[in-house]
Amino acid sequence: MMIQRRHLPGLMGALAAPGLARAQPGSWPARPVTLVVPWAAGGGTDIVARIFAQGFEQELRQPVNVVNRTGGGGITGHSAIATAAPDGYTLGTGTSEIANYRTLGLGDLGPDSLDLLSRIAVLPAGVTVQAGAAWGDFAAFAGALRESPRGRITGSGVGTGGAWHLAAAGLCRALGLEADRIRWIPSNGGAPALQDLVAGGIGVFTGSPIEAQSLAAAGRVKVLAVMGEQRLSTMPEVPTLRETGLSWAYANWFSLVAPRGIPAPVRETLLAAAQRAHARPEVQDQLKARGIVPVWDGPEGFSAFVRGFAETSAALLRDLGLAKT
């Protein structure tokens, strides 16, 4: 477990005493709040969580301690959120992987295990290749993918069945090809996958172009397209797949989630403070400056989104032969 801590006494208290009595509605928050991140420090989820936590602290007038609970492809952290005391003092940053654990047979954990409060941000996938690759634009890459034997072009960016793997599978299906036309090479995240790309070990990185931005600026990789609904503010020259004529978009998402069963008055206060925090200029500006798209859709909108997302993900996992249920 990796712990990134601010306000050490509040953090240790939150970890050491999960069984504390629920807060009375009128007193919440009377002490620091813990925000669990199921992924390692420095990654996309961690960055989003820490930016949001800054604004949340201002609204709550209490410390918000960001805790990284890693392991099991996100299962460890998501489980820690789901099983925490439903008192409003342990919240979490849920990610898209929560929609796939049951389909992958990794555990009895899904969106219904958590109180889905709202999405916070989305990070579109992309098509990034080595700077020296023969494909000058997405059309050339798509042509090579169609003409190459299945598995000739390799991709990476996350473990098998993860968000960026599904982005690649959906791209292939949108081109009328097998979901596994790009042979997936599992990785522990974007950074090692991008190093493999630069070294020529893989053919394409389908993770977020934001992760590749510094390498692109240095002329070591080139971003051919983004799988978002609109161009990224930090890479306005890169077209979306829809602009190239391909009907496919995919983005990883980051959300505010909580254990189920928080008392209604506390939940109402929590939600209102979180929405105000998300709208604060410093939160919005920091997200946008990194090419991360802020989103606030609330409990009903988020729940509806997750249902559709889970259906699309399950279909792709079946196409990839990875579905266990």
Image (cartoon, grey):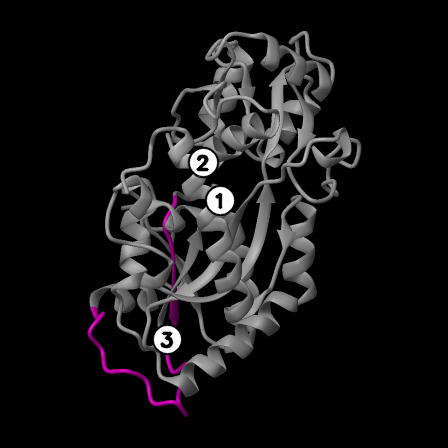
Mark 2 secondary-structure assignment: helix
Mark identifier at residue 316:
2
- Pick whichever of labels 2 and 3 is earlier in the sequence: 3
Mark 1 secondary-structure assignment: helix
Q: CA distance from mark 2 to mark 3?
A: 35 Å
Between residue 305 and residue 118, name the one nearer to us.
305
Q: Which residue is mark 3?
A: 88
Q: Which residue is mark 1?
A: 312
- Judge depth for marks 2 and 3 and give the one in front: 2
Residue type, numbered disc 3: Gly
> Which residue corresponds to the image point at 74% horizontal and 40% vertical from the top-left?
231
The residues colored magenta run 17-39
> Which residue corresponds to the image point at 73% horizontal and 14% vertical from the top-left?
136
Residue sitting at the far right? 237
> Which residue corresponds to the image point at 40% horizontal and 35% vertical from the top-left?
317
The spot of residue 130 in percent (x, y) is 61, 14
